[in-house]
Image (tube, rainbow, N blue to C red):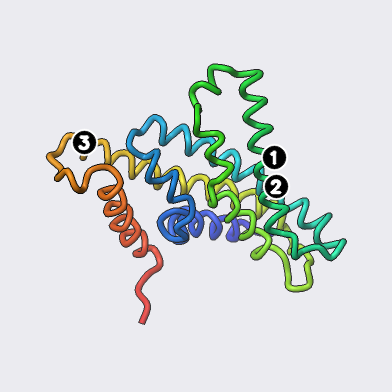
Amino acid sequence: MNASMFLTIFISAVFINNVILSRFLGLCSFIAISKETRPALAMSLAVMFVTTMSSIITWLIYRFLLIPFNMAYLRTISFILVIATFVQLVEMIIRKFAPALYRFFGIYLPLITVNCAVLGVAVLNSDMFFTADGKSMSGGFLYAAFQGICVGLGYTLAMLLMSAIRERLELCNVPKALKDFPLGFIIASIMSMAFMGFNGFRI
């Protein structure tokens, strides 16, 4: 375990392999909720929390349950169940103890359950931080947790950039045929091409 690995994970997850603009995961919430900055930020914070916690929980399940009992083939379904259960639990806790925060998040908390970016980071952790024979690499748990945070940061960066652009475009005279979703996809494609620059030039 070393600091350079953490730096590599940060740069990769936020810029080079951004979960939305490079891996194209979580596009539904990205397009639907990025019209205004406030809900975009709320969704981003919720996603960051869930990606971090689900990375921790799914890593533990994969390491201490699926691998020892030779059930790695159940990885996807078990991760989906864990994430859905965790999101519902978080929603109930927030509704009970912080009603104001629950009203602030609104529909965005349940939407995280079907956000493929959350499942994507869990699967990526098991692919990156386990060897071929199922053994965890040194520091794998901390790397997985940190990658969950960084994926959330990358999601937040993309959401805030998109919402800022779309809020400005509300003041422009946009052709009717391009309003809302069509223009959203055009902007997303341009942003994706811009983020491809972080990969560098290849011959």
Q: Is residue 95 placed above or below 179 in the rendered structure?
A: above
Q: Position of residue 79 (x, y in %)?
A: 69, 52
Q: CA distance from mark 2 to mark 1?
A: 6 Å
Q: Is residue 85 placed above or below 123 in the rendered structure?
A: above
Q: Position of residue 19 (x, y in %)?
A: 48, 54
Tell me the number on the disc at residue 170: 3
Which label sits in the foreground, 1 or 3? 1
Are the residues tagged 2 and 1 within 8 Å (C-beta)? yes
| Left or right relative to 181: residue 29 | right
| Left or right relative to 130: residue 166 | left
Foreground: 159 or 178?
A: 178
| Left or right relative to 35: residue 56 | right
Q: Quadrant of residue 1?
A: bottom right
Q: CA distance from mark 1 to mark 3?
A: 38 Å
| Residue at 64 percent of width and 64 percent of height | 128
Q: Amino acid at mark 1?
A: Thr
Residue position marked by numbered label 1 in the rendering: 85
Query: Going from the N terminus, do you reach mark 1 or mark 3 first?
Result: 1
